Image (spheres, rainbow, N blue to C red):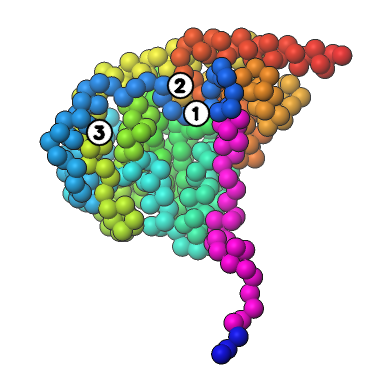
Amino acid sequence: MTEPTPRAPLAERALAQRVLAVPPSGIRRFFDIAATMQNVISLGVGEPDFDTPREIIEAGVESLREGRTHYTSNYGTIELRRALSDHLFRLYGVRYNPANEILITVGASEAVDLALRATCDPGDEVILHEPSYVAYVPAVVFAGGTVVHVPTRFEDDFALDPAVVEAAITPKTKGLFLGYPANPTGAVLTDAQQDALADIARRHDLIVYSDEIYDRLVYGDYRHRAFSSLPGMFERTILMGGFSKAYAMTGWRVGWLCAPAHLLEGIVKIHQYGIMSAPSVAQDAALVAITGGEAAVETMRAEYDRRRRLLVDGLNRLGLATFEPLGAFYAFPNITSTGLTSDEFVERLIQEEAVACVPGTAFGPSGEGHVRMCYATSYEKLEEALGRIERFLGRLKAERAS
């Protein structure tokens, strides 16, 4: 009998290197701490505190009662795809063919994963602004690609500088990943910045991956534009979004991906073999959301706006410099005045005052010196949180003076 070739034990080699290369989420540790404590005010979870609107829930219940519990088309129900096509055209003037340019996914997270896995070959580079949502880098790595980070800065309201993007392009660059309105900063892109990025993508023949999950949650005079609606961008943009944030449907797990037919044909292959179809009941509920949920969206958006003003003004009053976020539901205060690192600030704040937030470093190196605070919690809790933060900052000041 031939002796087996010597090699490392299975426990040391079972996991793929690309998995080992990705660290656990930088958010998780602080949630675990919060779970062991009483009376915690969480500004950490990026989830609406609203329940799904009643009419959307009832649509899901009726779907169950009617026995709509079977697979749908891999692409999703045609009714939801038609409604989404109309919705995007009405809002942004971009029209997708429901038959072969729209895919209903298991949340926007699946859409991001599909877009990258379908288009990235080993060695392909994807330019990504940071700080950015924690799942973007792992999604590129799991797809076999290489992330090229482009930092954004507090001084620029964390908007992406097109000149810095262009300087990062190499012969290996496959695409540009945009997540605006942005998590964790709440930043948005101006029309001029979008136009400049679109020009770069056209001239360098790049794919643009645009995650617009927060498109409906924008404030003040800012008006969102779908990136694929810009001149010459339809054919090279993969547009992604979902129902979780604007319609308070995080647990329903239903999102969408739109792309020209020649791209979607490849993307749907991964979806059909890995998922089959998004949940049928969730799709029926999403149809009611997108066709009749506009009043609920506006009610929630207006309340987020009220909370936004409270938190941003309050943090600035306390001496934690905070730029005005015009999208999503996050503030990203600068905490360098405290003399603490982002991790130290978050750990001490939760231990001493039971207020949970997320260190900026969880979203990339550019996040150091900042923390993410989510204002998708009640106005009253935000008021209480600001009082606790004020007490915490007073204690730090006394420590430095002693």
- Which residue position holds label 3? 286
- Which residue position holds label 1? 45
Q: Which residues are magenta?
A: 4-33
Q: Amino acid at mark 3?
A: Ala
Task: Pick whichever, 11 or 263, lies toward us.
Answer: 11
Q: Quadrant of the N terminus?
A: bottom right
Task: Pick whichever, 251 or 169, lies toward us.
Answer: 251
Q: Secondary structure at mark 2?
A: loop
Query: Residue, x 41% and y 50% (percent of image)?
Result: 113
Query: Residue, x 22% and y 37% (percent of image)?
Result: 281
Do the residues bearing badges 2 and 3 touch, measured as CB atoms within 8 Å? no
Q: Is residue 96 visible?
A: no
Q: Which percent across, then down, holds residue 302?
A: 38, 15
133 left or right of 271 in image: right
Q: Which percent across, then down, holds residue 68?
A: 16, 40
What is the quadrant of residue 332 in the picture? Answer: top right
Q: Is residue 284 visible?
A: yes
Task: Pick whichever, 96 or 11, lies toward us.
Answer: 11
Q: Amino acid at mark 2?
A: Ala
Does the stretch in magenta take in 147?
no
Do the residues bearing badges 2 and 1 touch, measured as CB atoms within 8 Å? yes
Q: Give the CA distance from mark 2 to mark 1.
A: 8 Å
- Which residue position holds label 2? 376
